[in-house]
Every structure is written in C-alpha cells, then in structure tokens.
Image (cartoon, helix red, strand yellow):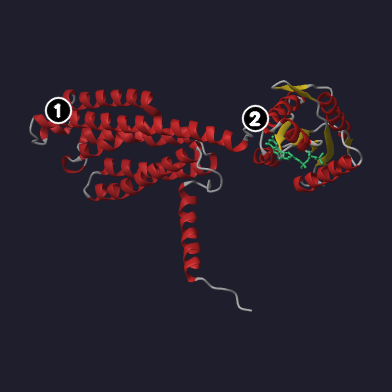
Amino acid sequence: MTKDFHPIKEKKHKSDKTKSAWLTFFYVGETSGEFSEETRRVFIINLFATVGALFTFPLGISSLYEGKVALGLFLIFIAFLYLMNHVYLRYTHNYTVSGNLVIYPLYILMVFLIYTGGIHGTGHVWIYCVPAVALFLHGMKRGLIELGVFTFILVMVMFFMDSHFDGAGYHSTLKSRIIFSFLVVVFLSAIYEYSMSRFNRDLKETSAKLELVAYTDALTELLNRRGMIQRLEDTKASSCHLLLADVDFFKRINDEYGHDVGDYALSTLGHLIQTALPEDGLAARWGGEEFLIAVCDGTELDAFALAESIRQKVEGYEFNHLDQKFHMTLSFGVSTMDERTSLRESITLADNRLYNAKHSGRNQTRRD
Ligand SMILES: Nc1nc2c(ncn2[C@@H]2O[C@H](COP(=O)(O)OP(=O)(O)OP(=O)(O)O)[C@@H](O)[C@H]2O)c(=O)[nH]1
C-alpha cells in the first residue's frame, strides 16, 4: 500500500520547519517550552543585535570607502560585537549582560556620530533608534534616567563643544530641533513601553488565575485530575505513593439527604483529607466521590499508615449540614509509582486495590 501524500500538509510541514530553523536562530536554541519572559527577552535582544550588525557592517564598509577610517572601524567593531553577542547569548542566555552589550556601544556610537557628523554631516539622524532600545532593555525608570543623561551629553556635545554642526552650514535652529524631536520620541517610546509592561503584567496575572482554575476542583478546592497528573509528571522524587480513596455508598447520601448535602459532604471530605496530609503531600478530587492522595519519597508503610489514619479520621467524623447528621467511610487502594512502575500503571494498580477493598467489605485500605 502506498503512503498517502498530502501536498498541502507537506507544504505546511516544510514551512513549519523553515520557521523553526530561523526562530531557533533568534531564540538562540530556546524553541521548546513556553514563550516565557526570559525567552522573549533573549529573542528581542538577539533581534536588536542582528538588526544592529546588519546596518553597522555595510555602513562601516561605506564609511571606509568615504575615507572616514575611524568611523568605519568603529562601525565594523560594533557589528563584530553584536555578532559575538549572539554567540554569548546562545551559550549563557544571560540577557542582562547581553542587553548592556547592545545599548552601551549604541550610546557611544551615537555621541561619536553627533560629534563628528558621520558621513556628510548626517550622523544625527540615527539617534532616534536609541529610546525604544533603552526603554525595552532597562525598563521605564532606569531607561528614562539613562536617556536623560544621554540627552544631557548630546546637549553638551552639540552646544558647548566644537562639534561638526558649527562648520556644516546648518541653520542655527537645527540643533534645538534635534533635541526637541528626540525628546518627543523618548516620550512616545515611554508611553509605548508603559502600556506594554502593563499589558504584560495583566496578561501574567490573568494566566496565573486561569491556571489556578484549570488545575483546581471548584467544589473541594483540591487539585483536579489534570492538576494532579501534571504535578506527578513533574515530580523530581524517585518514588511516590498513591492513595486512591472512594466514598462508600455515597449514592445513599445523595438519595437520602439530597444533592446539596452530598456536595457539602464532598467539600468537607476534601478539607478533612487536606488537613491530614504531610507538608509535601498532594490531594486531588479524582472523580465524583473519588480522591487521589500522593506522598512522595517515604516508605510504603508510611503511605499505608497515612491512608489508615485518614480512613479512621473520616470514620469518626460526624457530618452535619442543614440539620442532617450522618457518618461516611472511605475505602482505599494504595500503590507506588517509581522507576519500575509508571504513573498510569500505578493508578491502575491503586484502582484494582480499591476494587478489592470494596469487595472485601469497604471501609478498609488494601495494598494488594
Ligand atoms: N452531590 C454530589 N454527588 C456526586 C457528585 N459526583 C458524583 N456524585 C454521586 O456519587 C454517587 C456515586 O455512586 P456509585 O458510583 O454508585 O458509588 P457509591 O454509591 O459510592 O457506592 P460504592 O462506591 O460502591 O461504595 C452517584 O450517585 C453520583 O451522582 C457531586 O459532585 N456531588
């Protein structure tokens, strides 16, 4: 049988591959995982450095042709520095140092261009790229302080030093217009940076809330099944004991007292379980009236003892809601997840043992 061939799928797969190759370059290897703050910073700093290198290198060569040796060598040096920055980021992911390696050479280059005029007195046209880079790399407070110092240096160089402006035949108003227009760009970039950082903060808060909702059971406030699976999959412990508990004859509670009392019983049960756990224990509502408890490391005997203590605690507890008083019992199946038994296998084992507990008369813990 021949393999199916879908030209559209094939094309999409190809474009995904190309996309991931160039993204890998800019993410400096960080293609997997989520789009974290670190990844975003590494990505953008790398883009800044790449754009910087792509502009400074040809401009450096052209400056050498124009006979501006110092400027040409300076630009080529910065292109080389930005290229090295990519290598540095790739191996360290230290975006703080890397960001400094982008912005400080940029400040120096701009002062140099303002002082010398660059090619044919056009050096000042480049200063407008500084505010966005400074504010992104160093944030509002530090970015604005640096830009204030930078503006002060520009004023000193333009108005109080023997810069190229004086001999270039420009109109006298040009210098003040450059400073004013630069301040306008600083102001606009600051507004943009402020709105972006607020947006990012709100987004982080919302996603933290959504994550909490996605991994929590609303009735008992314990983890839900998805939350428990994620925590167990992420655990660094070499072994975890799973205690699967099921309420005995819970249907009778609903039938006798009503669904609201049944809900109260489940949420109280969640609280009883949670307060009986050791510090690093986890509890989840696994299904309707089923709870899964996980305790990592420790011995199987400790896990069995914990199941028994919870079972006895629930057995001795008097549930009391809307003038209805009643007792409930739990049956437990206990298993261990370790390097020999996967999470899925150990849940099946705990489930089988819970089944054995139910069929041996309920209100008991089984580990076989
Ligand atoms: N009030 C309430 N009842 C629930 C909830 N989720 C599941 N149930 C009830 O839990 C009961 C489970 O019944 P069964 O699976 O027959 O088990 P059981 O009566 O506990 O009997 P055994 O497990 O065999 O001891 C059903 O009546 C479900 O409606 C819930 O969120 N609230």
Residue 24: % across, % down: 50, 51
Residue drawn at 42 percent across, 45 percent down: 83
Number of the front mark, 2 or 1: 2
Task: Please indicate, yes or no, whether residue 97 appears anywhere in the rendered image.
Answer: no
User: Of 256 and 19, which appears nearest the observer?
Assistant: 256
Mark toward the start of the polypeptide (2 vs 1): 1
Task: Please indicate, yes or no, whether residue 333 appears anywhere in the rendered image.
Answer: yes
SS for callout 1? helix
Residue 343: % across, % down: 75, 45
Disc 2 from disc 1: Cα separation = 63 Å
How many numbered discs, if any? 2
- Is 59 drawn above or below residue 6 in the view shown? above
- The reply, left or right, for residue 260 in relation to residue 96 is right
Q: What label does residue 221 carry, if any?
A: 2
User: Of 180 and 349, which appears nearest the observer?
Assistant: 349
Q: Amino acid at mark 2?
A: Glu
Q: Which residue is mark 1?
A: 176
Residue behind label 1 places its C-beta within 8 angstroms of ligand 1: no
Please identify the quarter of the rendering in which residue 128 is found. top left
- The reply, left or right, for residue 261 in relation to residue 115 is right
Q: What label does residue 41 carry, if any?
A: none
Residue 362: % across, % down: 87, 36
Determine crowd level at label 1: few under 14, some 14-19, many 20+ residues with C-alpha closer than 10 A.
few
Residue drawn at 79 percent across, 21 percent down: 318
Which quarter of the rendered picture does the N terminus lie within?
bottom right
